Image: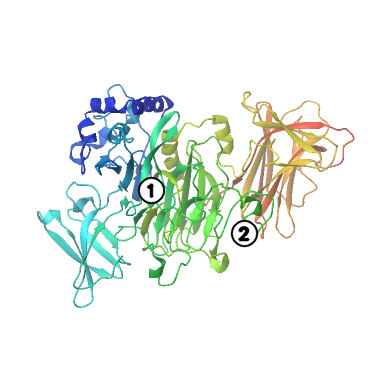
Amino acid sequence: MKARAMRLLSVLFAASIGLAACSGDSGDAQSAAGGASNLSAANVDSASLQAPNAPTLPCDAAANANTPCSAAHSVTRLLTKTYKGPLFQLTRASDGGTLDVYPYTSGTLPRGAESSLIGSANVNTASAFCNKTTCSITDIYDQIDLVAPLKNGAFGNVAATLTLNADGTESLTVPNPAAGANKTTTVPVLNGLATITLPGTSGTLTVQLSTPPTTLTTAAPLALSIGNDLPAIAGKPATLSYAQAQGAQIPALATLDGQGYRNRFGTVNQSLGDSDIAEYMVAGAHYDQSSTCCGTYGNMEASADPSTYAHGEIEGEMFALAFSNGNAATFGYCDGTGQDAPNVKDTVCNGLDTNWPGVDAEAGVYLYGPQQPPKERFVTVLAKYSPVTASNEFVVKSGAASQSVLTADFDAVPPEAWQFGQDAGHAFNGQWEGGLSLGEGGDGSAAPIQFFEGAILTKATSDTTDNSIQTSIANFYGPPSNPVAAACNAGNLIDSPLGLTDPAAWAQQTGGTAVAATDISGIERGAATLTNTGGSAFANVREIIRVQPNQAYTFSDYVLATTNATVFPGGSIQTDDPSGTEFGWVVDTNTGAIVRGTWGAGQASALSSIKVGNWWKITMTLTTPAGSNNAQVFIDPPTSNAAGVRSSQSTDYLTATHYCPSLAILKTASSS
């Protein structure tokens, strides 16, 4: 969403009651219990729900690539142009009244408002309805709405009945509007699944019914709803709140401990067993609540009650996106000062309330960095998995929601499986059960989140599709507060690439110091002038990050060009494999000639430099050795000669200016 449109949204929110009247929604916004907006699915066409020249929405981009969303939830905007229902339901504290909040359409957009607001949540009706009281979000509607053919143009989940027959079999009865009013269809339930042929189409629904919430008897059929909506856990809805986005207010779902949204029984067409899956969500990057353990949004166990689990909590029963501090995680990621095994969180980070993106795959919470930039309000977390019989991949990506490129935090074959901190002895594999939740872990553990939107898919997406999804996200939640900083952070695994002057992020060692300097923009001071204060051959600043073994990476750094230097800067990546392999480089800042640093035994697969304005951009590709879990990133002031030989210097205070060191996973040509 453009900044100008977002500023206008702020004005609209401030004047919500008056503008609600202008939009024709005021009467319904003041409705009593059971009231709803006057906008109904029947009088909305797809064109009216999309701004002119709007970018492709996330689930439309996925569908265009033949990897369609199987469920999509948002409190901020439409995620597909085909959906015509409400985004979420509010319940008012003062009288229990309810309101379904729809997106703006071309017909309900207030007079004079920017057309780019079309498709975003109608904050006018919401704020008018909640005027002088508080509201909670009691249901988040599924925008993919696979059960739509069963309800004749209505929205929301569909009422159904599960019956235990006299012969011990089970059957599911659902509406069949194609056969006439009040007509139904009954289908058998086999191995906890029912297959429904949708009336009027060739499509089918697979309904997950594996773990009934109560004991099923022949005397008492179980009433349930089928579909992929996310209703609040009874008595525990989150209060409607708002977040700042480019000076405006947008709706936010901010859960606390114990609050959550759950649909574990009766979901349709979700990934089951060891099969493809992909998910993304947009969350608050610096929410003041934090999950100590769990994934919070996605495919969960078929029950939140661990007493119903046949084999206990075992790996692969869930695939839920995490944005958590990992203090109780079986795998915790943190850029600290130690060098630890992959199932051990760096001790320096145990006291930090910092959230890391990743996946909770049950019995193993796989968290990967980096931290989110301090000035960015929203973060995208995206993950996907494909079994060994298909694409054989496990991917976690993250990044500021305002930027168009995500960082690949892990992108390889599935990692070693962890079972509550113990090596399971084999690679991770899925055993998905098809439940859905938000704001809780698989066993119902608290997993607070500030949630804005997300979607779940039953096929692993391509990188091209991931980029299309993130482009849509960035269009709505952007632009970034600092485009230069965003460009540095995009695709970068290093936690503080613009913090070389911060000793808490980059340790200053053996006489290496750093002070802020003007960066490549010519305006910002994101660069750092490194000084060799004592002439030591080993002066540097250093950060430690997690890496994966046998993974190809690209390292880059910008170094300010000179004309008459005689001693040159460089740097290195040193992994914690048994040999402590170090990949070094040195650049002649006069000519841009780059050579391998002779002090390191590691052999980079490529070294290059190109001139970018007054800077040399250094690029080094390398593959981490087996046994690597962490890497030290060293950035050096002048310590070496043009041949790459490092030595003590008789002249103190030699300087070189560095900007935006970066480490990124290098994908192979065969990768998706």
Task: Say whether residue 657 is visible.
Answer: yes
**Residue drawn at the location 18% of the way across and 77% of the way down:** 166
Q: Residues within 10 Å of mark 2 (few under 14, many from 20)?
A: some
- The answer, for residue 460, to whether it is visible in the render is no
| Tag of residue 199 | none
Pick the residue in front: 207 or 86.
Answer: 86
- N-term mark: 1 or 2: 2
Tell me the distance, in whole angstroms, between the alpha carbons under discs 1 and 2: 31 Å
Quadrant where the N terminus lies?
Answer: top left
Residue 123 % position (x, y) = 32, 33
Question: Quick one: which residue is furthest to the bottom in this view?
Answer: 167
Image side of residue 604 versus residue 467, left or right? right
Secondary structure found at label 1: strand
Residue at screen point 31% across, 28% down: 16
Residue 199 screen position, x and y as percent = 18, 55
Q: Is residue 556 above or below residue 22?
A: below
Q: Please name the residue shown 32% across and 24% down the image.
A: 113
Residue at label 1? Answer: 455
Q: How is the image coloured?
A: rainbow
Q: Residue furthest top?
A: 112
Q: Residue at x 73, y 34 (%)?
A: 514
Q: Give 125 or 498, whichever is nearer the viewer.
A: 125
- Mark 1: which amino acid? Ala
| Direction right: furthest residue | 650
Q: Are marks 1 and 2 in contact (CB under 8 Å)?
A: no
Nearer the viewer's eye, disc 1 or disc 2? 2
Name the kind of residue labelled 2 in the image: Val
The residue beneath circle 2 is 344
Does dot 2 land on a helix, a strand or a loop? loop
**Crowd around label 1: few <14 · some 14–19 · many ≥20 (10 Å):** many
Placement of 108 over or under 466, stated as above or below: above
